[in-house]
Image (tube, coloured by chain):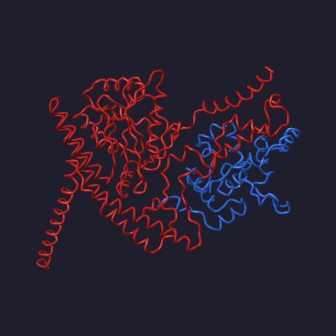
Amino acid sequence: MELFFNPFDNLLCILLGISFTVWFTLLLVFIIVPAIFGVSFGIRRLYMKTLLKVFEWATLRIERGAKEKNHHLYKPYSNAIIAKEPTSLEEEIKEIRRSGSNKDLDSAPEFEMSDIFYFARRGVESIMDDEVTKRFSAEELESWNLLTRSNYNFHYISLRLTVLWGLGLLIRYGFLLPLRVTLAFTGVGLLVFLTSVIGLLPNGRMKNFLSEKVHLMCYRICVRALTAIITYHDSENKPKNGGLCVANHTSPIDVIILASDGCYAMVGQIHGGLMGVIQKSMVKACPHIWFERSEVKDRHLVAKRLSDHVEDKSKLPILIFPEGTCINNTSVMMFKKGSFEIGATVYPVAIKYDPRFGDAFWNSSKFGMVNYLLRMMSSWAIVCSVWYLPPMSREEGEDAVQFANRVKAAIARQGGLVDLLWDGGLKRAKVKDTFKEEQQKLYSKMLVGTQEDRSRS
Amino acid sequence: MGSRASTLLREEEIEEIKKETGFSHSQITRLYSRFTSLDKGENGTLSREDFQRIPELAINPLGDRIINAFFPEGEDQVNFRGFMRTLAHFRPIEDNEKNKNSSASEPLNSRTNKLLFAFRLYDLDRDDKISRDELLQVLEKVDVEQKMSIRFLH
């Protein structure tokens, strides 16, 4: 019996050994070496094109399936469900009153019962479709991308489609996921190890040079770990030392995407665990700005550290996300004014993801970080475009809030996102009562206004 | 599995809601998707907090009263049927509905029902009384059908 097993065992070991070697060689040649040198074979773009064709076919099949059963397909619309009148409070109330009384406008009573129609309709409109709450959940897709998580019509799938979906599942979880996890561990491990090593060198040009190379290399490996296909536009506007790089925030991956194309000083809170280890070793190689939890609340301290860093021209540009939270990449929400007060040149960057291959939005109330990363690594790919916008500075007579809004408008315009004034913090917090009072003030001004006109005439 | 997929509306339910409210198939599925996205507790009903989470509604001076209109007397949860029944008041009146005689039961988006909705916003204690003359004035002249209707894009 033993004699029978031995050669079989040997054979198995040899086979395993060979496949491991082949696997790692392929990994090294096709992924890690190009990452080190910043070149690309173009495999990912080919992959992307093939996937698009498959998705189109899948969507057609679903539509056909629905038609055969004579059912209606649920079609997600990225546009609104209802048509909202863009008229203001004043215009509408005037209109309602004009049709309501045949007396002169000047002698109209201060308050009319019909005023309520405007508020009632606006209220119910916002219940049917509002601008804010839909920004905190993933965008709906028009065509199906073979992921169960984005399918709303799953009972119209034919056999062929199910087979394709099963195949996709196998490829994603059996091949892509382990590959990506290996790469991720390699990238992060190398980052921690190499930055710690570089930290031992004395400060100087050599250290900065090496630190730059190491950071870029490790981030490029992480980019491949997510199969991220990134297109950079207008690289001549890349942020320079002493500047502030400002971008819209969709997920923690934004950092990896930007940092694989340029070197930045990161800003953030020190975490515990693995994140903390990475942060501590990164700061050994080049100066990042990490805050203790207690320091985060102190706005003056934060502003001081940022402006100190910015004044030192030998230090890297700071990367900051003024929205303060992750938004679902269909809009840009209010920018916190803190970073716009320190007077540095601002380099805006717009990041727009293509959700067809994998939605990068991190819904932090629904998924934890690990869950999120697993979902990212088991999607098809992360496809995005990055636009470097020309630098902006605060103009004369412009305060921090206006400057922030100007930058936000530029980013929204470039990325094709909706520019909202609402605060991203509304994801978790309630609206401040002051906003409600503003609406009431507006209405009462209208009423008081008519009385003033009357007393004048 | 996406949570939406597991709680899709059945065709029979959609038909019933269609008959009761007059919304089209696509409007009902769209509004159902909206209902589920507001339902943070994922228990098939909305509470007052779910409505208050909408910032544009929270700053509306009548926000609380509008929210109350969705909840029948003494209840704290509204299901999808109740949600649609209240929203139906704001459906535009189509031309083929304008000349129906009142023998059939009144559609939810009739002129009278729209006015009843607005009336209830004033009548906080729900005793069916506000000043008669003021109400008549409103009844006579204002284009209620247009001001209390929301136009759908699809």
Residue A310 in the image: above or below residue B26: above
Chain A visual colour: red
Q: Is residue B73 left or right of residue A68?
A: right
* Above or below, B2 relative to B76: below
Q: Residue furthest right?
A: B133
Q: Could you say which quadrant of the image residue A283 lies in? A: top left
- Location of the C terminus of chain A (image quadrant): top right
Name the quarter where the N terminus of chain A is drawn: bottom left
Residue drawn at x 12%, y 74% is: A6
Residue B55: x percent and y percent?
Answer: 59, 40
Whether residue A384 sits left or right of residue A127 in the image: it is: left
Q: Is residue A6 above or below residue B122?
A: below
- A286 or B71, which is in the foreground? A286
Picture coordinates of residue A302, whole percent (x, y): 38, 26
Report the side of A155 relative to A343 (left or right): right
Chain B colour is blue
A90 left or right of A81 in image:
right
Q: How many marks on residues?
A: 0
Q: Position of residue A168 (x, y in %)?
A: 37, 66
Please, which residue is most extreme toward the top here? A456
State the image coordinates of residue A63 (x, y, percent, origin top left): 52, 68
Q: Residue at x 19, y 41 (%)?
A: A194
> Residue B79 appears in which quarter of the rendering?
bottom right
Residue that appears at 85% across and 38% down: B134
A113 vs A408, nearest the viewer: A408
